[in-house]
């Protein structure tokens, strides 16, 4: 069962972000908990270090042009780096690309793999498609931040969600030639 917490995070000025919902972390227990917060406009890059026993570390870079007028680098949530490699997933903000959901594969107490779905595309599996799955998703909202627990591996993952803008909701499901060409150009 998904538990959502409503919180009003974000700046207190006129550029305040809309109501943010926190979806509790899912997966395993243990490790050190961390929380990047839900006071960002969105995510610009995700770095995932994959190892023999699943996801070893993860790093999120956020953007918040309203407050900072530039991207901000996130912290590396570290695991063990034996025999591992890093994959990067970049989001294209010129096309207003944002994350709608993250599908997680979970086995033997650790998150094994991730699939990221945006409003434009779906990533290939990053890591392994082993074990049970769960999805971080709230219909009609986008992911703007993450929280989790990790140590040697990524044990659990949760997310912060904010409402989609009215323009995003109106264009959802549209099959216009212009939208299809824009999506294609953004992917190139």
Image: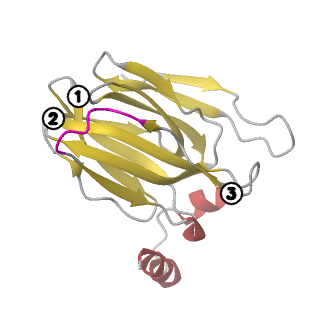
Return the residue at label 3: 70
Crowding at mark 1 (Cα within 10 Å: few <14, some 14-19, many 20+)? many
Using residue 63 as the reference point, say whether residue 116 is left or right of it: left
Q: Position of residue 71 (x, y in %)?
A: 62, 55
> Do the CB atoms of the residues marked 1 and 2 lie less than 8 Å apart?
yes
Report the residue at 58% width, 57% height from top.
169
| Cα–Cα span, label 1 and label 2 | 8 Å
**Left or right of residue 187: residue 28:** left
Residue occupied by mark 2: 53
| Secondary structure of the residue carrying numbered label 2 | loop
The quarter of the image holding the N terminus is: top left
Residue at image position (48%, 76%) is: 186
Alpha carbon distance from label 2 to label 3: 35 Å
Q: Which residues are magenta?
A: 77-83
Q: Position of residue 150 (x, y in %)?
A: 35, 26
In the picture of the structure, the residue carrying the numbered disc 1 is: 110
- Residue 179 colored magenta? no
């Amino acid at each position: 069962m998904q538990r959502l917490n409503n919180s009003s995070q974000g700046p207190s000025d006129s550029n305040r972000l809309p109501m943010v919902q926190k979806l509790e972390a899912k997966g395993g227990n243990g490790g050190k908990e961390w929380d990047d917060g839900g006071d960002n406009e969105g995510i610009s890059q995700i770095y995932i270090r994959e190892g023999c026993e699943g996801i070893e570390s993860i790093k999120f870079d956020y953007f918040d042009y309203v407050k900072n007028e530039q991207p901000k680098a996130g912290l590396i949530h570290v695991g063990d780096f034996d025999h591992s490699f890093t994959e990067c997933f970049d989001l294209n903000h010129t096309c207003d690309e944002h994350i709608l959901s993250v599908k997680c594969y979970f086995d033997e107490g650790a998150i094994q793999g991730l699939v990221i779905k945006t409003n434009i595309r779906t990533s290939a599996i990053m890591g392994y498609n082993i074990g049970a799955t769960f999805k971080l998703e709230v219909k009609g909202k986008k992911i703007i931040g993450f929280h989790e627990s990790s140590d040697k591996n990524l044990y659990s993952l949760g997310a912060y969600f904010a409402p989609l803008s009215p323009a995003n909701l109106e264009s959802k499901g549209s099959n216009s030639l212009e939208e299809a060409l824009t999506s294609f150009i953004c992917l190139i």
